[in-house]
Amino acid sequence: MAIQGTRKMDSGFAAWLRRDLLLAYRRRGEVASPIVFFIMVSTLIPLGLTPEAAQLAKVAAGMIWIMALLATLLSVDGLFASDYQDGSLEQMLITPQLLPLPILGKVTAHWLTTGLPLTLVSPLLGLMMSLPSAGYLPLLCSLALGTACLSLVGAVGAALTVSLRKGGLLLSLLVMPLYMPVIIFGTATVSYAVDGVNWLPPLAILGAMFAASVALCPMAAAGALRVTASN
Amino acid sequence: MYFESIEALLNMSGHGVYVWSSVAVTLAAMLWLVSAPLLNHRALLKEVNRDIQRQQDRELAEKATVPTDNHKESH
Amino acid sequence: MSRLSNWLPTNWQWFNRLGSPRWFYHRSERWLPWMSLAALLVLATGLVWGLAFAPEDAKQGNSFRIIYIHVPAAFLAQSGYFIMAIAGAIGLIWKMKISYMVMKAAAPIGAALTFIALFTGAVWGKPTWGAYWVWDARITSMLILLFLYAGVMALQYAYHSVDAASKASAILALVGTVNIPIINKSVDWWYTLHQPATIKLTSAPSMHMDMFMPLLVMIVGFYLFYAVALILHTRNEILRRERKTSWVRELATAKAGG
């Protein structure tokens, strides 16, 4: 057999990103449910606490962040699930490309279809919960970075539980402790701004967490998939 | 001893309930952590014996259902 | 594993041999008696010393004596998680079965110690701050540690294949280990954000020697206790996983007959 010329191989990131975005577009209804959940559950807060604007303003930042976290948690379960069921996950495992990069492509698509919409809808929720005006920009920035961290860390949990039948609940249990630093600094960013203090330091820490997650989580998820997906 | 009497030790100037309940719960948990494996150890060995017994019974049953003596050679 | 032993010089054979569950099972039988005795003596000494002989605290009175249980338990709960993660890492890197067994055994022990730390911390809080549950940095970090332990244990039991369960839990334990310093620092920071006056329950450097010595003894005692519990649980795990081997069967028949 003649020796083939070497072709430059792409990393797989763009291909899997495009694929997942296309699949999400075809399942628009399913993909929209975390955002709908986010908006609807936010109605529960005044019903459960109080309709008074002053009281709501005090808890607005924290509550919006908690709702965003829960919505992301619900959606991250499906990151690898459908691929595992139809066999494309196995294809991903045997391609010559380094596994972390296709995973990063998938996680990016997940953030674009979950985290980013949540971030863009959050000012509306801020309005409904009487968030002080100083808090809107910090809310957008912290949610943008924070939901990206949540998607990345959630991918590790999803990889660890992909082959289990009732994996969703276990997934929540596994990633919840890992989500806690993100929410601490996320809400702090908004609280600082509302109190009139410089809100860039907690945002910077959030940025550091994001950088660390981008570097480490795909590798951890890849390792986990190699263990669980062939189970 | 820091306290004048055993009663004072138990009472600890009003805080005795807190201190002694902590001690009690801790000792109970620590006792459970060592006694549970010891009990399980015996149960595990019994289970292995049961497995061995079951396998021997199965082998005996197989031998009993073999029709002729010639087949015994192939064991 | 036989290739590895060709690599290692003979005086590293102990590492190779340690990987054999059977060797560990038989060797640990000899360690247990004196370790248990040591643990018992040290714990008894520390407890009697701390509860009955140490002086009381100027601010908290006698309730501070709970420190002699709370701090060692919290210490071991954290160390126990790292021990579990290291065992998982050794299992992943060197593919040692016994390492995975130690990791599985370490999980419930650590979780129980975390519970002890939480319970004693809560009970201590009542006379000190007036409430059983106060969201201070230490107790919150302990609670998150309990969730981390629960996650590892849940993952272990979710998989039917022992191999997959071991590897997945090892990965999770390592992910948790990386996160523990991040979580602790975040919670510390979060607490100072909302309560500027940090009340330190245990300020070790400013503790009087008479109060500090029994604490050291208790920490040593807890470590010995942890080792005993870990060996006991690991031995059972060995029996469970190696039940089809001939040496386990011989052991069982010997015990039944003898």
Image (spheres, grey):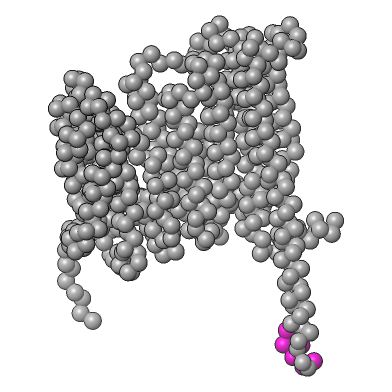
Q: Give left or right: position of A25 versus A87.
A: left
Q: Does residue C50 lie above or below C155 as drawn?
A: above
Question: Residue drawn at (50%, 49%), measured in percent from left and top?
Answer: C154
Which quarter of the picture shows residue C123? top right
- The quadrant of the picture occupied by the N terminus of chain A is bottom left
Q: Give left or right: position of A93 versus A173.
A: left
Q: Does residue C207 lie above or below C165 as drawn?
A: above
| Chain part drawn in magenta | B69-75
Q: Give residue B19's position: percent from left, percent from top.
A: 63, 20
Q: Give residue A186's position: percent from left, percent from top.
A: 26, 33
Question: Residue drawn at (47%, 54%), measured in percent from left and top?
Answer: C167
A31 or A213, nearer to the observer: A31
Q: Give residue C31's position: percent from left, percent from top.
A: 71, 40
Q: Give residue C50's position: percent from left, percent from top.
A: 65, 17
Q: Give left or right: position of C216 versus A226.
A: right
Q: Is residue C145 visible?
A: yes
Q: Is residue C10 visible?
A: no
Asked if residue B73 is among those painted magenta in the image, a careful observer would answer yes
Magenta segment main secondary structure: helix
Question: Residue drawn at (72%, 61%), measured in percent from left and top?
Answer: B48
C256 or C69, nearer to the observer: C69
